[in-house]
Amino acid sequence: MFDLERDRYQLLRTGWLEERRVYGALIHIDLEQGKVWIQYDGTEVGVANELVDRGIPKEEIVLAYHSPLMRQYNGFAVS
């Protein structure tokens, strides 16, 4: 799902895992104030790591799913 007006992006998963229905966000990213805000990351590798590997500095990535108090310890932007 892409909201180009508000710079909000989600990758959804849908289908079946054995006999259980699976549906929901796999990744949710917002672009705000020149930074990448990762709202949700359900991947094993980590979207933030992939972005860093592709040249986006850690100072421009906010792990929004961490509490504001804890962000100072994760090595990425606080806000």
Image: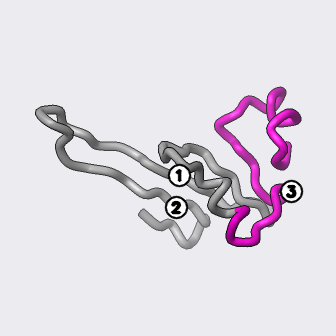
| Residue at numbered disc 2 | 9
Decide which of tag 3 and tag 1 comes sooner along the chain: 1
Decide which of tag 2 and tag 3 comes sooner along the chain: 2
Residue contact between numbered discs 2 and 3, judged by CB atoms under 8 Å:
no
- Image quarter of the N terminus: bottom left
Amino acid type at mark 3: Glu
Q: Is residue 78 above or below residue 73?
A: below
Q: Residue furthest left?
A: 19
Residue 24: image location, x then y, percent: 35, 43
Around disc 1, counting alpha carbons within 10 Å, would you say few (fewer than 14), some (14 to 19), or many (20 or more)? Answer: some
Q: Is residue 70 left or right of residue 50?
A: right
Residue contact between numbered discs 3 and 1, judged by CB atoms under 8 Å:
no
- Using the image, tell me which numbered label, if any, was put on residue 28: 1
Does the segment drawn in magenta span residue 59? yes
Q: Is residue 6 above or below residue 39?
A: below
Around disc 2, counting alpha carbons within 10 Å, would you say few (fewer than 14), some (14 to 19), or many (20 or more)? Answer: some
- Taking the image as drawn, is residue 79 in sight? no
Residue contact between numbered discs 1 and 2, judged by CB atoms under 8 Å:
yes
Of 36 and 52, the residue lying toward us: 52
**Rendered residue at 17%/43% (across/down):** 16
Badge 2 marks a residue whose secondary structure is: strand
